[in-house]
Amino acid sequence: MKVDFKIVEYRSSAYTDVLALQEAILREPVGLKFTPEEVADDKDYLHIGGYINEELCCATALVPEGDNVRMIRVATAPAFQNRGIGTLLLKYCEGLVKERGFTMITLNARERAVPFYQRSGYSIEGEMFMKLEIPHLKMFKKIV
């Protein structure tokens, strides 16, 4: 399956689509929406959208933190789930992170997503914690 990944400009129409997908997958099921403060913080993030035939199928954002990047809001549209697209998104982000000179990706994985990240080489750090009333684990992968 061919997925075209693009860096999405903050406040563009593509950004609006990315944010809507992330909100629908990650926030609405737990009764939440992104706050204006969260959206304002997005100006400092690198937003990525994955497209199949110009249809948005997945998205994430990368937050630079020193030599590391924190990956947030990893979301795949329901029609495209369980087709390997999330793995392609991770590989794209890992390449981009390496190309830009960062050495590690960190993320907070929802408990049910931990096996997915482990299959892609991410390791668990620390104990389970609650975020948005959902169990999470901090995970990381060194990029070499």
Image (cartoon, rainbow, N blue to C red):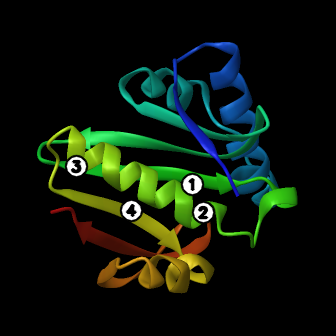
In-front residue for pair 31/76: 76
Label 2 SS:
helix
Q: Which residue is mark 4?
A: 107
Mark 2 surroundings: few (<14), some (14-19) or many (≥20) residues within 10 A: many
Whichever of callouts 1 and 3 sits on the residue coming sooner in the sequence is 1
Q: CA distance from mark 2 to mark 1?
A: 8 Å
Percent x, y for residue 19? 67, 34
Q: Which residue type does callout 4 highlight?
A: Leu
In-front residue for pair 93/4: 4
Q: CA distance from mark 2 to mark 3?
A: 18 Å
Whichever of callouts 3 and 4 sits on the residue coming sooner in the sequence is 3
Q: CA distance from mark 1 to mark 3?
A: 19 Å
Q: Which residue is mark 2?
A: 86
Mark 4 surroundings: few (<14), some (14-19) or many (≥20) residues within 10 A: many
Mark 3 surroundings: few (<14), some (14-19) or many (≥20) residues within 10 A: some
Percent x, y for residue 115? 53, 86
Q: Which residue is mark 1?
A: 74
**In contact (CB < 8 Å): disc 1 and disc 4:** yes
Percent x, y for residue 42? 47, 27
Whichever of callouts 1 and 4 sits on the residue coming sooner in the sequence is 1
Q: CA distance from mark 1 to mark 4?
A: 10 Å
Q: Quadrant of residue 91?
A: bottom left
Percent x, y for residue 17? 73, 29
Please indicate whether residue 40 sits to the left or right of residue 104 in the image: right
Q: Which residue is mark 3?
A: 98
